[in-house]
Image (cartoon, rainbow, N blue to C red):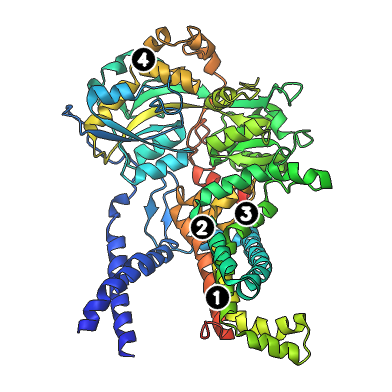
Amino acid sequence: MRLTALLTAPVLWLVVAYLGALAMLLVTAFFTIDSFTGNVIQQFNFGNFQDMLTDAAYKNVVLRTLGIAISVTFFCTVLAIPMAFYMAKIARPKTQKILVALVLTPLWASYLVKIYAWRTMLEPGNGVLDWLLKPIGIHSPGFGGPAIIIGLSYLWLPYMILPIYAGLERLPNNLLDASGDLGAHNFYTFRKVILPLIFPSLVAGSMFTFSLSLGDYITAQIIGGKLQMLGNVVYQNFSINLPFAATIATIPVTIMALYLYLVRRTGALASM
Amino acid sequence: MQKKRLFSRIAVASVAALILAGCSSGGDSASDSGVPKVDMMKELGAGEGQVNLVAWAGYVENGSTDPNVDWVTGFEKETGCKVNVKTGATSDDMVALMKTGEYDVVSASGDASLRLIYGGDVAPVNTDLIPNYADIFDNLKMQQWNSVDGVAYGVPHGRGANLLAYRTDIVKPAPTSWSSVFDVNSPYKGKITAYDSPIYIADAALYLMETQPELGIKYPYALDQTQFDAAVEVLKAQKPLIGEYWGDYLKHVASLKSGGTVLGTTWQVNINLAKGEGTKVEGIKPAGGSTGWSDTWMISSKAKNPNCAYLWMNHIASPAANAGVAEWFGEAPSNAKSCDLTADKNHCATFHAADDAYWADVYYWNTATEACLDGRTDVKCVPYSEWVKAWSSLRNS
């Protein structure tokens, strides 16, 4: 009985505020609107899903968003592994603490400030990147897909570094030594010893970078030029056609559910 | 196992309760053909101490943008109504914000006002309670976008045309028509901008009125399917030219300033802001006319601060405040007496406040409906909801 009482508040919170909102989203996706006033009409139909599936534009935006989320996850992983390895295995304890603090500091600054900073850096023609890279003949990519990938990779990098760092810290050093003693090269050790052991950390990190990129729309708005992501479609429609926005919003939910299912299949969730 | 079952039981119960609650509330949205009946305010009481506004950028200035531009502080002191303002980027934003019921007053353009009236989101306005209403230009009162069946739904604010902005130091020769933003061989490819709203389809339609008269477009908000498709094609061809679509006026001004945008559609207020920051930029109303707006201050049917709302509507229609907004935003004032109070004595002449001929080729934003607004009865026109879909599809393709 006491357990019930104790659990009710948090469970109610989780269910009403969190799952409840998701349920309402799903229900709203089947409603429609009055074509003139824009008021929601609560009448069950599949019209929104039909619109979404028949218009090639939405297939493109899903693929584009997926591509961006995957690229961001990839770049974050590639950047985070060496960084985390240095922090966990090579740096001295004192440096280690400073590095962890440095990785965390960007999280203290506002998202918007950081993205607007990237806007001035990426500005084609007179931005910081152009000024810096012109001598070696490289131009800023300008606003668009590459800019979004750069911006999001920058934003979510700490979320990838920290789990990998935690995973590497738990990895005993003597495993690496043993591998070396048995004649494995560094890369072979990395592939056969380190990678399998930090795989759950990679999965944890990728869940952050992937899902955060999948739902983002502000970065695309500020440095995406005319390019739109799934979040922008929702943002664009929610004021005019709420049910259609809800329909679009079910896509990232489905993708994430699928992703989590696949992760579960690999068993990484259990060993996290 | 016991725990799990407990959790799921609470979960199922709460979701069910929530869905029931969600479905039963908001049941007042039943749409009938007419205007929902909303009561009009009978007499003015004491102010509530605050008023919440939804307005276009530049309509409600308290001196924080420019210390010399302030018509809010005086009002607050005089009436005790603190003014809270939320800036809407597009008419669609404004309609959505007003539907929340959290705002008292809105400065609605013609493509929002009728949707708000027919949606039951705004109340009729008792113009007897607004002394300054008497001085408003007669040809702005009781128009099809601010009244229904002889009942006024708001106080006219002012009107203006959407302008063609260009960087005078970069775009040479200076553009003279809208074709400069639709020319697929434009040398300014990638540095052209367009307004990020479905209503921009009307700009393409206006361009077609001039360049393809055989389509027979008479009014850019009344497009049959063929005309509509042609307009969307124009926008599809234009897309490669666009660097950024703008909705956020501050970002737009920053783009004009940095040279990321050198040519495209804008408002006079953006030109003023960019010039204020030293940008060499001009805005013109090209030959062949322009889309534009004629705005109306409307009161929410769910206003929590109706007395302060009426006080605000009276204040913003007063000659001094109306002159201030008109001059800051760069539009023609609605109050005839404003013209004596503008800092630039030629303002009303420059903006053609009383010059009906000038407004003949300005097509105020309007909400497209299935019944063609240009009076054609032999075809069905494409309603605004389809404009929204087409725009969303265009932006995401």
Tag 3 subunit: A
Mark 2 to mark 1 CA distance (whole Å): 18 Å
Mark closest to the chain's N terminus, 2 or 3: 2
> Is B182 in front, or is A165?
A165
What kind of residue is marked 4? Ala
Mark 4 to mark 1 CA distance (whole Å): 65 Å
Q: Which residue is mark 1?
A: A166
Mark 2 to mark 3 CA distance (whole Å): 14 Å
Q: Is residue B119 left or right of residue A190?
A: left
Q: Identify the residue shown where x is 26% and y is 24%.
A: B77
Q: Residues within 10 Å of mark 1 (few under 14, many from 20)?
A: some
Q: Which residue is mark 3?
A: A151
Mark closest to the chain's N terminus, 2 or 1: 2
What kind of residue is marked 3? Gly
Mark 4 to mark 3 CA distance (whole Å): 46 Å
Q: Residues within 10 Å of mark 2 (few under 14, many from 20)?
A: some
Q: Which residue is mark 2?
A: A107
Mark 2 to mark 4 CA distance (whole Å): 47 Å
What kind of residue is marked 2? Leu
